[in-house]
Amino acid sequence: MTRVVLRPIASPLPLGFFALGIGSVVLSSLQLGWVPTGQSGMLLLLVLIFVVPLQFVAGLFAFLARDAGAGTALLLLGAAWAGTSVTSLDSPPGRPVATQAVFLLALVPFVLALAAAAALAKPLFAGLLTLTALRFGLTGLYEASLGSALQVTAGWTGIAIGVYALYGGLALLVEDGKQRTVLPLFRRGAARRSIEGDLREQLTPAQQEAGVRHQL
């Protein structure tokens, strides 16, 4: 007889939503000129110290919760925040950087692929990833020296991400506390069954999951 032991953990998605939202608003304040360019280094350090660790924690616990899609997305975004923040610290403030353009534009199709996969079960999360991909694309085009209007548009997109993430994180926290969906999350398929289904539905597929089967 084979026995698989599962350890319940709290959902890391609210943390991931809130960290992404806060980071987006902080960087938008720089892109929209609300913070002087000379203070950009302080903002980037705040992103590195506050946002990046929370994204990594959320991503790791998403993998422990057996959600490969959420874990991949959160860790990818956390690493992206870290990479862009570190390179921006070494770049002239307020000026486009071609290296940043290449990196950000390369991220876009991969984040969109994650959004497409999430849309099958978690449309709310897919929407957040789509907005994030849009912002990466707009910022990348600005870094490619295609016009400052793109930076402003990216900044307002970041504000929209912050509002979206605030709602999503709150809805997930309320759902976790009530053990039922209160604010609309638009779950579908397996994600909806994870809340409304019984324990047998949750555990039966575990024998095919990574860590149990022999090969990934």
Image (cartoon, grey):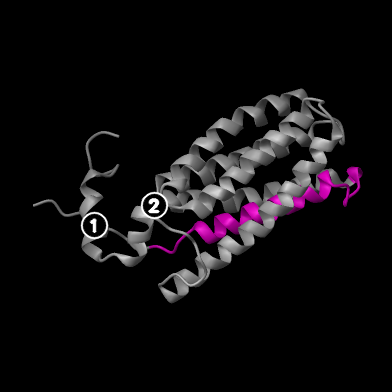
The residue shown at (68%, 56%) is 162
Q: Could you say which is closer to the camera, residue 189 or residue 71?
A: 189
Crowding near pointer 1: few (<14 within 10 Å), some, many (20+)? few
Q: Quadrant of the C terminus?
A: top left
Q: Position of residue 12 (x, y in %)?
A: 49, 58
Does the rendering let one see residue 50? Answer: no
Nearest to N terminus: mark 2 or mark 1: 2
Q: Position of residue 159 (x, y in %)?
A: 73, 53
Q: Amino acid at mark 1?
A: Leu
71 left or right, relative to 198: right
Q: Which residues are magenta?
A: 9-38
Q: Could you say which is closer to the camera, residue 53 or residue 152?
A: 152
Residue at numbered disc 1: 203
Q: Does 80 appear above or below 195? A: above
**Residue most extreme to the left:** 1
Decide whether the magenta segment is chiefly helix, strand or loop.
helix
Q: Does 189 appear above or below 88? A: below
**Magenta segment: does it hold 126?**
no
67 left or right, relative to 77: left
For residue 64, which numbered disc appears in the image? 2
The secondary element bearing badge 1 is classed as helix
